Amino acid sequence: MDCMFCKIIQNKIPSKKVYEDDGILAFEDVNPQAPVHILIIPKKHIPTSLEIEEEDNELIGRMFQVANRIATDREVAERGFRIVMNCNSEAGQTVFHVHLHLLAGRAMHWPPG
Ligand code: AMP
Ligand code: ZN
């Protein structure tokens, strides 16, 4: 399958890994938009949030727990951080393998751009 994030999971494309377990991988975003910008992905290929099914509920929940753990480890949990999942083109999704963006280390604006 021609999916960049599946290739990262398979170590065919290098990444700066932050966390890994049986079902989840987290790595540094190659084009960071904040001092902390980490992507948290399921090892299961799910193209967009629209394809998340009931059987994925535990996996998706654990992605948030991984994000919380990384935010705590990076000492940004108390200051605050943002978790984003873009879906399809108007939201700016460019890689069609679901991922959480963990963004932190600077003040975030609202509404988002
Ligand atoms: P999105 O636009 O929500 O689909 O986010 C895709 C993210 O993946 C962007 O923030 C990119 O900078 C990031 N990205 C693309 N290719 C790589 C890569 N090889 N390693 C790490 N991050 C990547
Ligand atoms: Zn994939």
Image (cartoon, helix red, strand yellow):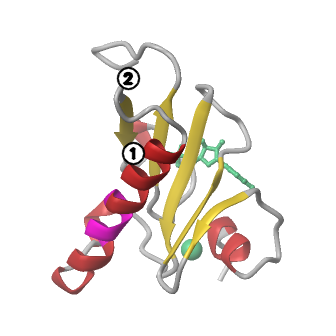
Question: Is the residue indicated by label 1 positioned so its CB lies within 8 Å of ligand 1?
Answer: yes
- Residue at 33% over, 58% down: 64
Residue at 39% from the left image edge and 45% from the top image edge = 86
Q: Amino acid at mark 1?
A: Asn
Q: Residue 8: image x %, image y %?
A: 71, 70
Residue at x 32%, y 69% (from the top left corner) = 62
The residue carrying mark 1 is 86
Res 14 quadrant in image: bottom right
- Say what secondary structure mark 1 lies in: loop
**What range of the chain is rendered magenta?**
60-64
Q: Residue 39, position in %: x, y?
A: 55, 52
Residue 84, quarter of the rendered image: top left
Residue for badge 2: 79
As drawn, is 86 to the left or to the right of 10?
A: left
Secondary structure state at the residue bearing disc 2: loop
Q: Residues within 10 Å of mark 1 (few under 14, many from 20)?
A: some
